[in-house]
Amino acid sequence: MAQDFQFKYFTISQNRTALKVGTDSMLLGALISANAPKYALDLGAGTGVLSLMLCQKFPTLNVDAIEIDKGAFQDCLFNVNQSSWSEQVHAIHGDYLNYVFLRSYDLIVSNPPFYLEHAAGMKRESEVAKHTSKEDFSMFISVVKSLLTQDGTCWMIIPHAQLMFLKDCTKNVSLYVNEIIYIDAKESKPNSRIVVSLSNFSTPINTSRLVIRNEDNSYSDSYINLTKEFHSKDLKK
């Protein structure tokens, strides 16, 4: 049985999902910024961790959280119902590539399957869940375009190696990369991930960099300061 992940203001049960809470979700949830969003969409919500982080950041936000995997959806529903934001998060069991959404959103977030290889031969559920096809990723970007309000933003985290493909996908649907945060596992291990902000407007791309760990494997001050409102434990210890 997987151990619950204790956040500062909520708990994530992850007994039925293949993908557990990790640094990617923590980074993305902590880095997202938006100007008083009203309606958010969590595409591929998993255990609901990003949805609950958003509610902590934006107390009046309403979130639709859609998840295709039955076990992950059950965890998501449980976590939402046990949280302080149960009235604000609507958990949906469905495939966001085919689901008929009834509104548009001024904030869309996703920690999508992002390894662009076929999952054939993979046995572990966690491996399969992390992989997608280029066609499905392109469709995912099209879904974002169709659901994002004219002045809304979409935030996601992907491997650095997929940046050019992401830019190709966004170009095809007239979305634009506005911000890129380069994530270094350590200074000696740069570009492990990128956090990206997209919108309907073309602007000069704002870039920055975040190092997660020092060379001695302790957490960097930047990471500690970024996530201190979410982590329930003191990362300096």
Image (spheres, helix red, strand yellow):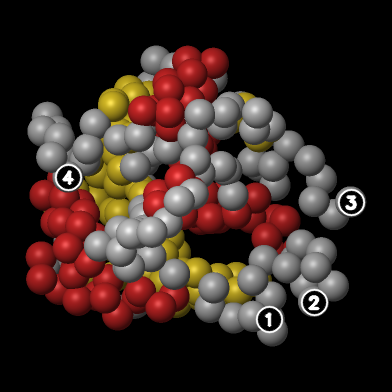
Residue 226 in sight from this viewpoint: yes
C-alpha distance separating marks 1 and 2: 7 Å
Q: Which residue is mark 4?
A: 97
What residue is shown at x 49% (from left), y 49% (from top)? 124
Outermost residue, front direction?
Answer: 121
Mark 1 or 2 closer to N-term?
1
C-alpha distance separating marks 4 and 2: 41 Å
Mark 3 or 4 closer to N-term?
4
Q: Which residue is mark 2?
A: 215
Q: Position of residue 84 (x, y in %)?
A: 53, 18
Q: Nearer the viewer, residue 127 or 140?
A: 127
Q: Are marks 4 and 1 in contact (CB under 8 Å)?
A: no
> Can you tell which of label 3 and label 4 is closer to the viewer?
4
Q: Which residue is mark 1?
A: 187
C-alpha distance separating marks 2 and 3: 16 Å
> Can you tell which of label 4 and label 2 is closer to the viewer?
4
Is 98 placed above or below 210 here?
A: above
At numbered mark 1, what does the secondary structure look like: helix, strand or loop?
A: loop
Q: Position of residue 194 (x, y in %)?
A: 46, 69
Q: Amino acid at mark 3?
A: Lys
C-alpha distance separating marks 3 and 4: 43 Å
Q: Amino acid at mark 4?
A: Leu
Pointer 4: residues within 10 angstroms few (<14), some, or many (20+)? some
Residue 30 in sight from this viewpoint: no
Q: Position of residue 159 (x, y in %)?
A: 44, 69
Mark 1 or 3 closer to N-term?
1
Q: Are marks 1 and 2 in contact (CB under 8 Å)?
A: yes
Report the side of 17 relative to 216 (left or right). Answer: left
What residue is shown at x 10% (from left), y 33% (from top)? 100
